[in-house]
Image: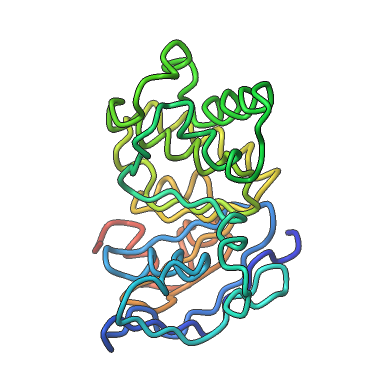
Amino acid sequence: MGDYKIEIKDLRVSYEKKPALKGISVSIPEHEVFAVIGPANSGKTTLLKCINRTLELEPGTSVRGTVTIDGLDAGQMRDVYGLRRRIGMVFPLPVGLPLSVYDNVAYAPRMAGTRKKAILNEIVERCLTQAALWDEVKDRLGTLGTMLSGGQQQRLTIARALSHDPEILCLDEFSIAIDPVTTMRIEDVLVQLKKKMTIILVTNLVQQARRLGDITCFINKGELVQVGPTETLFSDDPGNQLTYDYIHGVFG
């Protein structure tokens, strides 16, 4: 296990005074897949939004506790946009920019100052390949991204998230709009990507967490139930009855 990339301590979040996270404390190692599982409305997405500070854009939210990245308090960072550039975010439903497929992926590198066509071409091909989309769109890169199918748009969103070489990649139920075959292809890519970045995977598919997670974190009703090596949580005796019941479909 490597050094901790992210450390979350006593994180408490409320929406309009209604608790969403109740004192979450977890440490996320570098270059590993940290899987987050739990029923709907357990606070999994809220956890992701605290890491890249997009939660503060939502009115009526209250956040206490600390999130540190590389030992620095993310909540005290003045360059919020710089922080968010270090973190790629992929949400459940694709939100494509009203641009071509090519420009969707090239947008962030251009904003960072990359202008050379050859470099942009390499970034676009690499990111689309990593998102298991290149073979399907390489002959129509000028097509509007919003004209792609739902599953293709989701993969385009993943490619866009990878285009600024993030240190951390957060995926919130990325496979919700993707067919199982393509989901498996992207899972293979994620295994390779963790060599370069830390991956936080929120998923309602417990078997996906089992396949990909080095560490699995189980949250229920805003509370941390259990966190530990994935093989422990998915064993016949994880040491917590609630964990066992959720993973085996007793509730969810």
In which quadrant of the rendered image does the C terminus lie?
Answer: bottom left
To which quarter of the image does residue 245 belong? bottom left
Residue 252 vs residue 78, the one in the foreground: 78
- The percent position of residue 69, horizontal first and vertical second, equals 66, 69
Q: Is residue 100 above or below residue 10?
A: above
- The percent position of residue 22, horizontal first and vertical second, equals 40, 84
To which quarter of the image does residue 40 belong? bottom left
Residue 168 vs residue 191, the one in the foreground: 168
To which quarter of the image does residue 12 belong? bottom left
Report the number of numbered marks: 0
Left or right, 194 with reference to 227: right
In which quadrant of the rendered image does the N terminus lie?
Answer: bottom right
Give the residue displayed 57% in from the left and 82% down from the top: 66
Residue 168 vs residue 214, the one in the foreground: 168
- The percent position of residue 182, horizontal first and vertical second, equals 40, 28
Q: Is residue 214 above or below residue 62?
A: above
Give the residue displayed 35% in from the left and 64% down from the top: 38
Give the residue displayed 65% in from the left and 32% down from the top: 115
- The percent position of residue 103, horizontal first and vertical second, equals 47, 30
Give the residue displayed 34% in from the left and 53% down from the top: 204
